[in-house]
Image: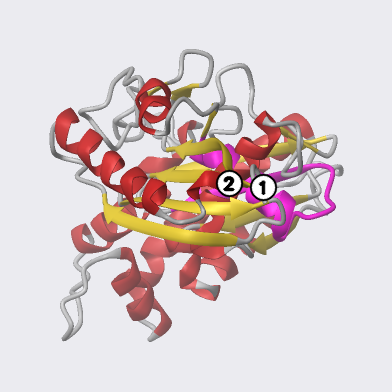
Amino acid sequence: MPNDLVAALDIGGTKIAGALVDSGGRLLARTQRPTPAREGADQLHATVDEVLGELTAAHEWHRVAAVGIGSAGPVDAKAGTVSPVNIPAWRDHPLVAAVRERAGGLPVALIGDGPAIAAAEHWQGAAKGRAHALCMVVSTGVGGGLILNGALHSGPTGNAGHIGHISVDLDGEPCPCGSHGCVETIASGTNIARRALESGWQPGPDQDATAAGVAAAARAGDPLARAAYARAARALAAGIAATAALVELEIAVIGGGVARAGEVLFDPLRAELRRYATLPYVQGLELAPAATGTDAGLIGAASAGWQLLGEGGCEG
């Protein structure tokens, strides 16, 4: 059955993943590589090329009608370029043109990773059927996307909803984006781990000094680990409440690696949200973990591909 699949690419600071996806959101052929985030542009391009090469070699490739890309941002959907904060070698990198050439001239859609998770959660996950939602990814960075009036609102360049770069600490630390005190400088996995270590927390016998290791220690009752997650929850709550006050939301969905900490994150986040979301029209804001898991970026990218074709996915 020709033209019943799209190819999806999920490009982040940790991994570059690819899959072929049908109109129901089912992932078929898939592949993944670590992101060489500190390498040069050539190595990054080679990694994307490897992922695309595996997809084009799949026996289903002849059924692919378009390619959707969800990338760490900022992105410029109009220009087809990406400048991920956590991938320094890519600044105004012409990713769409490179992918289009490698994919044999197929049409290519580009959105930020935050809008991608929003599209995924609205299409297949915790925000399904909701008209007004903020969907976030809290991982190496912090991103977000908006569902407004039942449709993805990605903005003119594909970056709308980028909650990670709302400043919640006016005297805070510099952010790689150029601002200060952004949500990402406090609540990303990298910064949770850094904060815990700086406060005197020591990794356990497994020497896991990542946010996952901090979460395990917090779960076991370590006060320094718990404090690092409480601080991250405060920053997230401030950003979520500000967004809800601005556009009115029914639900905030949290995904990404940090969200896998479970109640270590969600318990203090609920408490902090009650402190910050005080206006009557935001007090009932629901908070939920993402349901699409590690596949969110691919599902959201596929949704963008289907929308490019005028079919399925999350309307934008």
Residue at 42%, 35% in the rendered image: 182
- Please report contact status of discs 2 and 1: CB closer than 8 Å, yes or no: yes
Q: CA distance from mark 2 to mark 1?
A: 6 Å
Residue under numbered circle 1: 4
Residue under numbered circle 2: 63
Q: Is residue 29 above or below residue 316?
A: below
Q: Residues within 10 Å of mark 1 (few under 14, many from 20)?
A: some
Total labels drawn: 2
Q: Nearer the viewer, residue 214 or 15?
A: 15
Based on the displayed image, in which of its 4 quarters is residue 116 positioned? Answer: top right
Q: Amino acid at mark 1?
A: Asp
Specify start and end residues of the magenta stretch as a single range.
112-138
Residue at 66%, 29% in the rendered image: 308
Instruction: Give the structural element (helix, strand or loop) at label 1.
Output: loop
Q: Residues within 10 Å of mark 2 (few under 14, many from 20)?
A: some
Residue at 40%, 46% in the rendered image: 56
Disc with the residue nearer the chain's start (2 vs 1) = 1
Rendering coords of residue 65 (x, y %)? 59, 37
Q: Is residue 269 left or right of residue 179?
A: right
Q: Is residue 248 above or below residue 268?
A: above
Rendering coords of residue 58 (x, y %)? 42, 55
Residue 153 seen by the camera: no
